Image: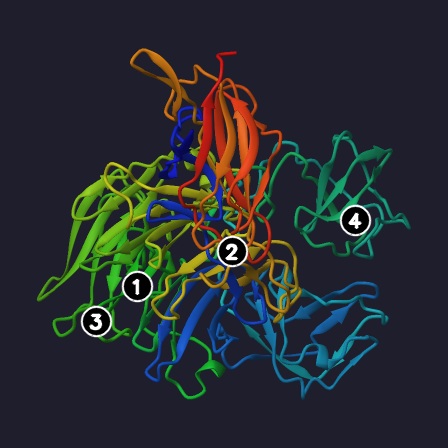
Amino acid sequence: MLQKLGFLPGFNKQVTSTGAESQWIDGENVRFRYGTPEKIGGWNQLGQDKLTGAARGLHHFVNKSSTKFAAIGTNRILYVYSGGVYYDIHPLVNPSGTAITSAFSTTNGSPTVTITANSNGFQAGDIVLFGDTSTFSSITNSNFTAADFADKKFMVTSIVDTNNFTITMPSNETGSGATTSGGITYYRYYHVGPAEQIGAFGWGIALWGGTILGAITTTLNGAITGTTGGNNSSSTEITLTSTTGFPSTGTNHVTIGTEEISYTGITGNKLTGIGRGARGSTATTHSNGATVTNSSSFTGWGSPAANTDKVTDPGLWSLDNLGSTLIALIHNGECFQWDGDAANATATRATIITGAPTASRDMLVSTPDRHLVFFGTETTIGDKTTQDDMFIRFSSQENINDYTPTSTNSAGTQRLADGSRIIGAKLGRNAIYIWSDTSLFTMRFVGGDFIFAFEQVGTNCGLIGMNAAVEVDGAAYWMSENGFFRYTGKLESMDCLVEDYVYDDLNTTSNMLIYCGINNLFGEITWFYPTSTSNVVNRAVSYSYLDSTAKRPIWFTNASSLFPRTTWEDSSVFGLPHGTQYDASVDTSFDVTGNTDGTTIYFEHETGVNQQLAATTATAIPANITSGDYDITQKVIRGAATNLGDLRGDGENIMRVSRIIPDFIAQQGDAIIQLDLRNYPNNAAASSSLGPFTVSSTTTKVDTRARARAIALTISNTAVDTNWKLGTFRLDIQTGGRR
């Protein structure tokens, strides 16, 4: 007898497969629309290039000439995308450039170039741009030429000292070692931050000066003249005056000057198995008689600590616009503006907003009143040491350069009381929502003497990460450290049938990487997050805010390696939603030499059914969805057993499935149907003997031989140009015996 299969929308991961009767329990690259599952739409790469670093901010806006811009802030560079092209608009610390002379040095066989620039202020990973080399008259004894540096960007590899830093060329030096004459100009990009959220080590964590226990000292017996090898013509040994008291087993360390050197053994007065430039230090030369300190059991200032309980935030951006002007804030740093209406705007760079705070956690433009608001900012403007994580400062109306309250302007300040730091803020329809690590506040424009009214509207509901909240249709939705919440005038804890799946495998150390986005085309809110074994975003969880009801919230997850997005922007400007994907592997991007921070690809979503990367053929988006187990109870009519089954049974009887009648809406390409069989909940599921079954748009039925107490249905696809939306499946089911 044919039986219709009906499933409730959304996933239920809070129960076992047996407990999830008539429900879906898992899937990838699927969504629910009008109560039924379908494969998600495809996406295309925008532009031909990759971006340097991990995208941590995305914002769309339009200028007065109707030119559309997408501002993309990575942890290294601020870009704008327009007309299929990416433009570097990152602000410069020294906009006029700094001239240096005779500043390049190289070593044969090494790609490292050391740059001498006094008091340069660079940090490892920063971007340096070299300007015109017309005065860079010559590079001798080197295969590198002036053209290798002119108007090119490099990632700073290491900091030697306050006056010297290194960059890495694509190839080794083949000459005897460069000498330069004449000058060149360099430009320093504002520092943003690391690509990942990491533990902090060294100064501020370790003891100042290091611990004293075990700090035995001696001297070098013979100079170390190079940056590799040891002294006294040895390439693997260092001769000391004495090795008494130095540990001799395992890997240990000594400190000479600023260099850390590892060793694995001791023979007489010699350290053997040495490794130069250990613990992130830089190898250098050392004179005979230089002090050698046993640093195996202590950490000194400037050296990495062995462990930490402090986490450094990643390089984040807060992006917004005031009319045609892009406003861009570096997380815990400075704020910049870029005029989208300027003549040849894409050839200009963002510039610092004079008068604005120089250290803030978050920022937005309050509309329609047009105040620029900073959160977790300075109590004394321009003094970063006064940054207060709970302090709010807003500009005068229509004046982003005026922040000092007077009787003639509307600038002002406010300090929130509940929490230890402001995590993030979002502009809503009727208010600005502000989250601390513990609470929710609203900020409403009221005008008059007070300008803004502040109210605490929620407790024990703090935001987990700066970008983990959205506002849609007058309601705020967010992810906290202990669940999902909604505010619609009252605070609500959201029922979630995938909550344990998310929170039991969540990397809370990387919570600032979580990014929440809206897809209003399908009424979805999605949180992209990292799992416990990942330092980058690798999963997503979605909530259907249009189709959900109070009694039946619709949630679904996505663990596909194709779909994790580090930022997301809805379709309001470009007509389709956009997102960014980060690849942490070393990949030299199109615009920065020596990039080790990985790259970002920018996508347009809900277009086609495949993944389309630039200059490549389309690749498939494999999708699948799996139901919970269903079983059968033999019905009794007037005391007589029948073969008419009830799919919400107790599993007492074996059922036999002889046919599947597929039903897809607007099917494109082939779908795959699989029946997984088990007799007891703890049994491993086994595929039906004739399956899996390939189903085309013309397939009317599928013959199968399936016998089990419980059967789960999986629908999937693997090929390009495939799309499907589930209709109402029917199975030809009969009851069998109890054995």
Q: Which of 1 and 325 is in front in this view?
A: 1
Q: Give above or below for 624 relative to 346.
A: above
Q: Rate crowding at label 1 as few (under 14), some (14 to 19) or many (20 or more) other CA atoms within 10 Å.
A: many
Q: Which of marks 1 and 4 is in front?
A: 1
Q: Is mark 4 on a helix, strand or loop?
A: loop
Q: What label sits on residue 289 in the rendered view? A: 4
Q: Distance between the residues labelled 3 and 1?
A: 14 Å
Tell me if 239 is positioned left or right of 193 in this view.
right
Tell me if 200 is positioned left or right of 465 in this view.
right
- Label located before the other in sequence (1 or 2): 1
Q: Do the residues labelled 4 and 3 touch (CB within 8 Å)?
A: no
- Label located before the other in sequence (3 or 1): 1
Q: Count the marks: how many?
A: 4
Three-letter amino acid code at the position of disc 2: Gln
Q: Are marks 2 and 3 in contact (CB under 8 Å)?
A: no
User: Image quadrant of residue 139?
Assistant: bottom right
Query: Which residue position is annotated with label 1?
Result: 364
- Label located before the other in sequence (2 or 4): 4
Q: What label sits on residue 291 in the rendered view? A: none
Query: Which residue position is annotated with label 2?
Result: 668
Q: Where is residue 659 in the image (x, y as percent from the top left)?
A: 51, 34
Three-letter amino acid code at the position of disc 4: Gly
Q: How far apart are marks 2 and 4 (CA)?
A: 78 Å
Q: Can residue 421 be seen in this view?
A: no
Q: Is mark 1 on a helix, strand or loop?
A: strand
Q: Which of 492 and 13 is in front in this view?
A: 13
Query: Which residue position is annotated with label 3?
Result: 396
Q: Distance between the residues labelled 4 and 3?
A: 63 Å
Q: Residue, x 51% and y 56% (percent of image)?
A: 668
Q: In which quarter of the image is the N terminus?
A: top left
Q: Which of marks 2 and 4 is in front?
A: 2
Three-letter amino acid code at the position of disc 1: Leu
